[in-house]
Image (cartoon, grey):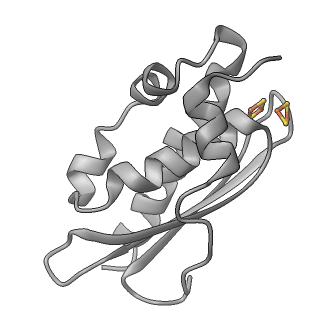
Amino acid sequence: MAYGKKVMDHYENPRNVGVLDKNAKNVGTGMVGAPACGDVMRLQIKIDDNGVIEDAKFKTYGCGSAIASSSLLTQWVKGKTLDEATKIKNSDIAEELSLPPVKIHCSVLAEDAIKAAINDIKSKI
Ligand code: FES
Ligand code: FES
């Protein structure tokens, strides 16, 4: 399948690939898998004293659309509060990246991952 321009950009130059210390109190980790294809995504966020997301990292074992979705999401959540980050929908990601219908689940993976990361951090604070 041909990938769109924005997907290729994130795929070739993924933003914020990496790891944060999952044991830190101000770090939340979301690890999710896509039943549709077996791809796995880990998304982590770090909040500052005001509850604002100051850093985000991801590692995705999956297709180009999954990598692009998580890369874009790490960019979007920086500077947002947890509540603001919760409001990001997979459809926003799919629209921004012009994902075709068969790749929508890749953006769902990203939404699930950020929600899981937020729940993880809320369970710590
Ligand atoms: Fe799993 Fe996309 S189908 S890599
Ligand atoms: Fe399965 Fe993209 S995450 S094809």
Q: Which residue occupies 56% across, 39% down?
A: 69
Name the quadrant of the C terminus: bottom left
Is residue 39 shown above or below 124?
above
Identify which residue, 51 or 54, lies in the foreground. 54
Where does the image place residue 46, in percent across and percent down from the top left? 38, 75
- 78 with respect to 73 (left or right): left
Which residue is farthest left?
50
How many discs mark residues in the rendered view?
Answer: 0
Q: Quadrant of ligand 2?
A: top right
Q: Which residue is at a point 78% across and 18% down the rendered structure image?
A: 2
Q: Nearer the viewer, residue 123 or 14?
A: 14
Residue 75 to residue 25: above or below: above
Residue lying at 53% horizontally and 65% vertically, measured from the top left = 16
Tell me where residue 28 appears, x and y as whole percent: 46, 71
- Which of 57 and 97 lies nearest the eye of the viewer? 97
Which quadrant of the figure contains the N terminus?
A: top right
Q: Position of residue 56 (x, y in %)?
A: 45, 67
